[in-house]
């Protein structure tokens, strides 16, 4: 059975560092035989997000994709030492248990290491409140990323090692969950 992974990008930037990393992770997962759906908060209309239109067809589609996913990766830039407000506007209008039983890999990119703990103290509690099963996650600094390198934007060897290790752990958890279900 092919597992469906949803990758959610919380950056409002058209040319986004965090999203370039998410796309790279998506390509690694496809190589591993997973089916990957990318969602960006930029895919939703401003009206839907700003007016909190939780009954809109797009929000229903996003909800269904996330609920049916075997694993979800949530990425955000660090904004004012936390996740982006845009990510929150989307998560606010999803059901409160939308990530129930779902392994979640959190990812953040930030301008410096000073806000490294935004991953621990901002993004992870948010995902846990939606009942996601948080994995350790990855924090990358801007100097470690070249978003113009589409195939692999991570130009820092140690950062790349950390990221591939976390992705491998994420797929291991998903595959073992699948095996348990099938047994
Ligand atoms: C509005 C704004 C606020 C930011 N606040 C922080 C911050 O508090 N701490 C930090 O380390 N970087 C901060 N940054 C830098 C971004 O987190 C960083 O460049 C990130 O990689 C951008 O990701 P993106 O290109 O996917 O949007 C901020 C950037 C912007 C535009």
Image (cartoon, grey):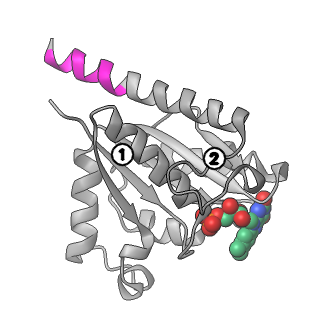
The C terminus is located in which quarter? top left
Q: Is residue 62 above or below residue 89?
A: above
Write the residue at 78% across / 60% down: 111
Label drawn at residue 154: 2
Instruction: Magenta stretch: give its range.
Output: 174-182
Q: Quadrant of residue 60?
A: bottom left
**Drawn side of residue 108 relative to residue 45, left or right:** right
**Drawn side of residue 168 relative to residue 70, left or right:** right
Q: Is residue 23 above or below residue 148?
A: above
Looking at the rendering, the quadrant in which ligand 1 lies is bottom right
Q: SS for tag 1?
A: loop
Q: Nearer the viewer, residue 31 or 42?
A: 31
Q: SS for tag 2?
A: loop
Q: Let me know if residue 110 is in the magenta part.
A: no
- The residue pinned by badge 1 equals 99
Q: Residues within 10 Å of mark 2 (few under 14, many from 20)?
A: many
The kind of secondary structure the magenta stretch mainly shows is helix
Q: Residue 33 at x, y = what percent?
A: 27, 33
The N terminus is located in which quarter? top left
Q: Residue 52 at x, y = what percent?
A: 38, 79
Which residue lies most toward the top here?
183
């Amino acid at each position: 059975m092919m597992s469906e992974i949803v990758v959610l990008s919380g950056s409002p930037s058209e040319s986004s560092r965090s999203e370039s990393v998410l796309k790279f992770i998506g390509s690694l997962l496809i190589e591993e035989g997973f089916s990957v759906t990318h969602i960006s908060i930029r895919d939703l209309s401003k009206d839907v997000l700003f007016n909190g239109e939780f009954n809109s067809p797009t929000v229903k589609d996003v909800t269904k994709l996330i609920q049916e996913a075997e694993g979800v990766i949530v990425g955000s830039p660090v904004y004012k030492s936390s996740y982006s407000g845009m990510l929150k506007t989307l998560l606010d209008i999803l059901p409160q248990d939308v990530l129930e039983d779902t392994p979640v890999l959190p990812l953040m990119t930030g301008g410096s290491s000073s806000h490294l703990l935004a991953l621990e103290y901002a993004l992870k509690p948010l995902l846990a409140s939606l009942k996601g099963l948080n994995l350790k996650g990855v924090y990358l600094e801007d100097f470690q990323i070249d978003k113009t390198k589409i195939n692999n934007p991570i130009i820092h060897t140690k950062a790349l090692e950390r990221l591939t290790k976390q992705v491998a752990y994420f797929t291991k958890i998903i595959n073992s969950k699948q095996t348990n279900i099938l047994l």
